[in-house]
Image: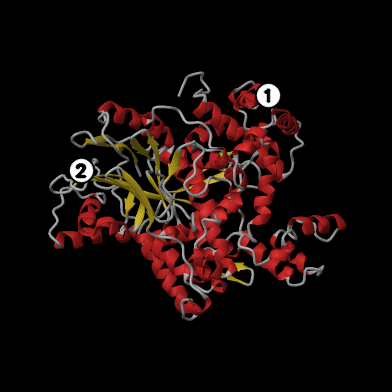
Amino acid sequence: MCGLAGILNLEPGAPVRPDELAAMLVPLAHRGPDGTGTFLAEPEQVGLAHARLSIIDLAGGAQPIRNESGSVQVVFNGEIFNYIELRAELEQAGHRFYTRTDTEVLVHLYEEHGLRFVDRLNGQFAIALWDGDARRLVLARDRAGILPLFHARDGGRLVFASEIKSLLRGLSRRPGMNRAALDQVFTFWSPVGTATLFDGVEQLPPGHLLVAERGRITMERYWDWTFGLPGEYRRGSVADLARELDALLGDATRIRLRADVPVGAYLSGGLDSTALVALMREGGIAPNTFSLAFEDPGLDESAFQREAADFFGVRHRTIRVGEGDIRAGFVETVYRAETPFLRCAPIPLMALSRLAHANDCKVVMTGEGSDEVFGGYDLFKEAKIRRFWARQSASKWRPRLLQRLYPYLDITSARGQAYSEAFFGAGLAEAGAAFFAHEPRWRTTAQGKALFSDETRQAIREDAVGQFGRSLPREFASWDPFNQSQYVEAKTLLANYLLSTQGDRMLMANSVEGRFPYLDHRVIEFANALDPRLKMHVLNEKYLLKKAVGARLPPAILARKKQPYRSPDSRAFEAVRDDFVAEALSEASLRRAGYFDAARTQLLVRKVRAGRAVSYKDSMTFIGVLSTQVWHALFVEGVTPGGGRL
């Protein structure tokens, strides 16, 4: 992966200058440490810039890349995994190539198919393409949203970049906070749709094109998660469908091994990452594997990681993370993510990519996306139990099924039963509602909004859930409830949190590219066409996936109960220190930023420092407030921990 940036004059004005492009490249150095390149179109109507992380055609792949005449120019962040097949097809059609890169297929594919060129791509990408003959700029983002791409209007200009910190260098003013996006963070864990935390800065949503032509900007969706209806589900026996899925995953993994550098793997010790290592071994690759371990035994999965590594005979490395590492890495993580977050889970993942980089690994396979595609989250099981409970809401034994899902819950005592009915029983009368599966979580997360200041409340014109509901496709209501929950998860948590805050940003902080076989669009489309009962069989999650890959795995890995990835959170901040974090939480800083009620927030801060913030809600609220305050200091006030200016 790389970094791109650019400026387009939408109307006659000052020409795009080389020094502007150079300035935008500076904050992208971590995305592309192997070289930079720029293109300026006469009469300087558009400028493209690129920072390169060389993965394919190490010597000859410098960008921008052009077509034969130079009329089409492209800068590109990502990988086109089917580029070998596309190149052969394009050469047969008469196109001439001057590099061995995957990037070059983009300009020729665009010449052949126009804006529909994206339909032919199997990859993860953010693309900026300039068609000089048509005076047209095309921005494109991959289907699942693996790679980021941001844009903003600045007077008569369109400014765009892979990261907002780069885009800011091209703007005439520093934007403030988009408080509606903060409301989304305190609901869904991340902004959704086109929103970012920066007022006036938008993200191009996954599966979308933005076209700027003759001063006019349009945006269209070229792909989306869609699901079949009951009479349209993919037919076949479980064994036949498992073989078909096995072949698809095998090919998705095979083409993601295409690189001129070694490809490693993240190994969590769970089903998804272990299966990928198995598929890589079958492809003749013995990848170096990298894992996280935690000082807290309740979070640690290292025993399963070692078992998987030993089973496949791979060279394995682990980095151990404790509460001190969480505090030490907090500010940099906010800077990299460019958004507040409610959990500290991204911080260890940045340490993990640092471990990969230190071992000369530029590319890693990860199992991200499998839970969304195959219904692996406890949330899907929980919703199934709650719907079963809703059919007899007075039942006392039906809610006890939740103990199979959360064995640590005390549902048998009077107090435990009261909690269960209050939390899981909320909304049972609306079991057919679009967000039935997600509302308990969203409700818990949203309790942190009690700390919002009056100014923040007044700036939020529409409830985050209601606004998101208006974005649902018309066919959503006809889908099975399980599939509805998958769609919501893909649109809220996956693209803008898991693949961004926890994914791309933490990988690229250390110049490491992640690859995601489970998010191959062919795999998604196959899974979306299945009967939901093949994804969750009773309460057995990822049923068909286990049938497809289970024989390859160590028995203990296949049989283990799913353990969600978690890291230390608010406990890391109990000790009072005189540092950037403490200053961000001071009453003066809270009042200056104005997002939260300073007096009420200080009560939570004291509760955390006294070691009394033991609830999930308190921890999430504290981390959300702290990361927002750090975000404000970094990006609005422009202050760094060393006292410098951004």
Task: Name the colouring of the figure.
Answer: secondary structure
Q: Is residue 3 left or right of 445 when viewed as pictured? A: left
Q: Is residue 639 left or right of 621 when viewed as pictured? A: left
**Which label is found at residue 60?**
2
Query: For this rendering, which residue is in front, 379 or 72?
Result: 72
Q: Quadrant of residue 168?
A: top left
Query: For this rendering, which residue is in front, 256 or 169?
Result: 169
Query: For this rendering, which residue is in front, 398 or 300?
Result: 398
Residue 490 at x, y = what percent?
51, 56
Answer above or below: position of 406 versus 566: below
User: Where is mark 1, residue-wise?
Assistant: 587
Helix, strand or loop under label 1: helix
Looking at the rendered structure, the kind of residue marked 1 is Glu
Looking at the rendered structure, the kind of residue marked 2 is Gly
Does the rendering let one see residue 439? Answer: yes
Image quarter of the N terminus? top left
Q: Is residue 386 left or right of 258 when viewed as pictured? A: right
Helix, strand or loop under label 2: loop
Residue 253 at x, y = what percent?
38, 60
